[in-house]
Amino acid sequence: MSFEHPNRNGETIREVEREIMKRPPEHNHTNLDLDRMTLMLDLLGHPEQSFRVIHVTGTNGKGSTARMAEAICRAYGLRTGLYTSPHLERINERIAIDGQELSDDDFADAWDQIKDLVDMVDVKMAEQGKPKMSFFEVLTSMAIWKFADAPVDVAVVEVGMGGRDDATNVLDADAAVIGPVDMDHMQWLGSEIEDIAEHKAGIIKPDCTAVVGPQPHEDEVMPIIEDKVRACHARLLRDGYEMEVVSRMPAVGGQVATLRTPNGTYTEVPIAKFGEHQAHNALAALAAAEVVIPVNGPLDGDAVAEALSGVKIPGRIEQIRTSPTIIVDGGHNVNAAESLRAAIEENYDFEQLVGVVAMMHDKQVEQYLGVLEPVLSQIVVTENSWRDRVMPAEELEKVAVKVFGPDRVIRRDDLPDAIQTAVDLVDAADETGVGYGRGVLICGSFVTAGDARTLLKERMNPELAKPKAERVAGGDASDGDASDGDAFDGGEPDDGERIEPNLGE
């Protein structure tokens, strides 16, 4: 497959990515304002005014909610744009039109269309003593331009971090979705839950509809959201009040739920994801879609069912292998760990589940591991590809030993070795050879999830796609050492390189 764009003199998509990702990260105390984005939209001629907007924030679940809302809008025949972060494997994933991520050519073209304007913004900011555009601001600008160029009817846009000061908040939402607000990114959003809620509530705009999911800190968070709603003369829809998950039941590949919104009740809706939290995400997505779809009354139940039963959400409690079962999850905070544990307990009956964990050093690592400890037989601690932020495996091992005890913790400094070790452990305990009741959970970060998905692709490691009986025998599972005959050979993802700047986590 060629990565060359015809208008770029042979420049590859990887080189385009480098141009963008070498810019400052969005996690920067010096650029927490919308000045650069406001100027960019002025230079572009305000393309954001050509489409309706569903804007989604929350500590967890915003990516899932955004994908579900986009799927519902698309099922109704609307042209859709979807902007999400972080990406797991390819930067193109962040921008999608009508359910399809941008091709390499289209992604490069979007950069070509705005790069001269980016330079103009940088110059203007320098004159004012302000930093140049961050890579996230550039990507957001590319998405907005592409959505207008398509053109789309509705753009579903996930906040990168927080909300009030996020680059995406130059958009005026028709529906502002706020999922569960919990403790995360405290070094940027504040150390108190009220501080974080102020940031999240910042996406509520005049005369919009605020769709608010279940809140684990309701007494602290809801007064802040309600004050913002009143100030903006907005409409408020709350999970458990104006809308609710009436009932839900686990099913093969996900669950079936009955959802009530102000427009009607949708019975036995299939949702292609595990976990109670995904039913609430689906409810928020449905309520938001009702705001932008031009239909009086409830939406067509068959269209809603078709959308939610087919939506794919990579890296969110995603089962990517069987025999043994391998699950990948990108959640990285305590609330995400709680949802992950609940989904595993509800939908799986593991006799043995081995965790493979790599986390960023700035997360609540001990608390995260503490939530998952009851469902993990053993844990293999390791590192992902983001060397600037990942917690060194040696440090993670010390934290894990405090939670699990020394006998349940193994350290492997590289993710391929860690996955191989975990697979060997479950294989060694699998007397029947069918893998039933045994699995591997790879989690702790979206970077970890993305690395694992790349490594586990069948084209990279075909042996792991086979049942245990057909796989090449590996090393001694008692110590997890790898040998030349291991089923998981690791290798390097893609072209052996990962671009490491901030991915939005």
Image (cartoon, helix red, strand yellow):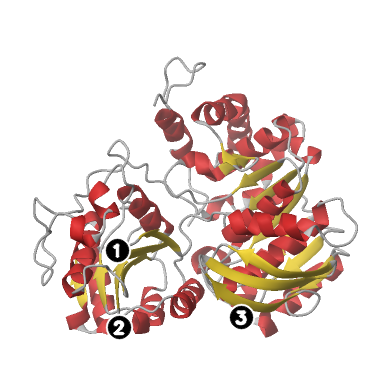
Q: Name which of mark 1 and mark 2 comes first in the sequence.
A: 1
Q: Residue at x 65, y 33 (%)?
A: 146
Give the residue at mark 2.
403
Left or right: residue 204 versus residue 108 is: right
Residue 344, x across and y down, in percent: 44, 75
* Amino acid residing under circle 3: Pro
* Amino acid residing under circle 2: Val
Q: Is residue 130 visible?
A: no
Give the residue at mark 3.
216
Q: CA distance from mark 1 to mark 2?
A: 28 Å
Left or right: residue 316 versus residue 68 is: left
| Dot 2 and dot 3 residues touching (CB under 8 Å) | no
Left or right: residue 430 versus residue 121 is: left
Which mark is nearer the camera, 3 or 1? Answer: 1
Residue 337, x across and y down, in percent: 45, 74
* Amino acid residing under circle 1: Ser
Q: Which of the 4 image quadrants contains residue 251?
A: bottom right
